[in-house]
Image: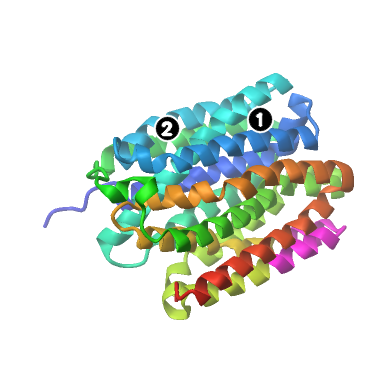
């Protein structure tokens, strides 16, 4: 009997997802330290995130065109080293200028990695003919949960360079596994390969706008959690990453059995219930002045948001099986407005009215997303 290949394609892509989560955790946990080192305030940080998000969305929106000339494997092998370098440079930014130079490049790498690791994951699910997509996103959540609290501790005890070193090691492992285990796939071709001729555009539009509001909420919870906890209890700065950590670990706790939940309960009921839980969590963040209660609220938000984006991505890819990367690109393009405006708006509100108040406003955006998902269901899509 022939021994199974090591690493398997599934293991390799899972490692990329975990590394992606580690990058997010590094950003979330070290955020207060980066702000102090670079000499920037919340409003300036929000502007930087907005610029970065423009590059992230831009990279994802052209992914369908890139898929016509480069395989998922080729893109990942090219972008992972650039991602590691840009993340390290951002974490060690010591001036506002260096911060603004590095954060857009990092945003570009975030977008390309996000799109093409998801495109490969959806294709692997199709190859295996069973639902496994949620487990990949569980890897992201686990990476966030572990790295967020580790990053806040490393940044305060050793410096942000230590956070960059740990992340770089994981990126190197991911690159080697992709090179060894992932084979190039046939490139997308024909009318379905072009953004302008994608079928099923109306349901993709509903999913894309809803996804933008949800991703904006996720980004706010992850990247501003340490700032909120640092404000509530400055003496606990070394564990300010606990908010993002509990968010990520609770995300993972739901995502790993998420494929079974999709099968048993149906995607639409699961998404509607998840949005309601998320809205309650953000309302609690807006009202709380307690470190413990806020950490619990971040955990609640983690539970609620866990299945939403993976489910939207999976449904979008199923709508256009001829070009899954193109479908994800189209959906990503439609996320642009809420994703781009949210960091700047959050930063302005946080600087003027408080971080907790800004978190409370996120619940309003999720209410709008709930309305879009219900409209999608009423039009006869989903299950």
Span colored in magenta? 279-295
Q: Main secondary structure of the magenta part?
A: helix
Q: Is-magenta flag for residue 10? A: no
Structural distance between the alpha carbons of marks 2 and 1:
22 Å
Q: Which mark is residue 160?
A: 1
Quarter of the figure with the N terminus = bottom left
Q: Residue at x 55, y 32 (%)?
A: 106
Q: Quadrant of residue 305?
A: bottom right
From the viewer's side, name the closer residue of 94 and 113.
Answer: 113
- Can you see residue 14? no
Closer to the camera in the image, 229 or 326 = 326
Figure check: 274 above or below 340: below
Going 61% across and 30% down the picture, which residue do you hit? 103
Pinpoint residue 285: horizontal percent, then vertical percent. Answer: 79, 59
- Residue 182 is situated, as x and y percent measured from the top left of the image, at 28, 43
- Residue at 79% across / 49% down in the picture? 229
Position above or below: 210 against 179: below
The residue closer to the viewer here, 191 or 142, is 191
Name the spot of residue 3 as percent of width and height, x first: 18, 53
192 to the left or right of 138: left
Q: Position of residue 212 (x, y in %)?
A: 58, 53
Helix, strand or loop at mark 2: helix
> Which one is earlier in the sequence, the residue at label 2 or at label 1?
2
Can residue 120 be seen by looking at this rendering?
yes
Vertical arrangement, residue 13 with respect to residue 277, above or below: above
- The residue indicated by pointer 2 is 79
- Residue 280 colored in magenta in the image: yes
Image quadrant containing the C terminus? bottom left
Mark 2 or 1: in front is 2
């Amino acid at each position: 009997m022939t021994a199974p290949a090591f690493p398997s394609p599934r293991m390799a892509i899972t490692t990329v997802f975990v590394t992606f989560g580690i990058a997010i955790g590094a950003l979330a946990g070290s955020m207060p330290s980066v702000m102090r080192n670079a000499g920037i305030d919340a409003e300036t940080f929000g502007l930087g995130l907005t610029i970065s998000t423009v590059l992230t969305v831009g990279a994802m929106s052209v992914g369908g065109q890139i898929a016509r000339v480069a395989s998922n494997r080729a893109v990942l092998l090219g972008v992972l080293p650039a991602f590691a370098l840009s993340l390290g440079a951002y974490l060690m930014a010591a001036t506002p200028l260096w911060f603004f130079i590095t954060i857009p490049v990092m945003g570009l790498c975030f977008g390309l990695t996000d799109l093409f690791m998801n495109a490969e994951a959806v294709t692997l699910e199709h190859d295996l003919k069973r639902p496994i997509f949620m487990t990949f996103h569980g890897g992201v959540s686990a990476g966030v949960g572990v790295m967020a609290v580790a990053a806040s501790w490393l940044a305060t005890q050793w410096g942000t360079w230590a956070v960059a070193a740990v992340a770089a090691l994981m990126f190197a492992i991911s690159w080697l596994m992709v090179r060894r285990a992932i084979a190039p796939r046939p490139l997308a071709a024909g009318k379905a390969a072009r953004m302008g001729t994608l079928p099923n555009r109306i349901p993709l539009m509903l999913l894309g706008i809803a996804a933008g509001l949800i991703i904006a909420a996720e980004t706010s919870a992850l990247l501003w959690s340490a700032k909120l906890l640092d404000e509530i209890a400055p003496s606990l700065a070394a564990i300010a990453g606990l908010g993002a950590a509990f968010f990520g670990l609770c995300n993972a706790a739901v995502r790993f059995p998420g494929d079974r939940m999709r099968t048993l309960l149906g995607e639409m009921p699961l998404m509607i219930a998840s949005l309601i839980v998320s809205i309650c969590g953000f309302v609690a963040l807006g009202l709380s002045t307690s470190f413990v209660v806020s950490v619990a609220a971040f955990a609640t938000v983690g539970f609620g948001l866990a299945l939403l984006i993976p489910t939207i991505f999976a449904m979008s890819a199923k709508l256009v099986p001829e070009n899954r990367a193109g479908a994800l690109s189209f959906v990503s393009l439609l996320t642009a407005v809420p994703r781009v405006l949210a960091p700047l708006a959050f930063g302005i509100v946080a600087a003027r009215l408080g971080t907790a108040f800004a978190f409370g406003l996120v619940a309003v955006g999720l209410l709008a997303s709930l309305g879009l998902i219900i409209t999608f269901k009423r039009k006869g899509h989903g299950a």
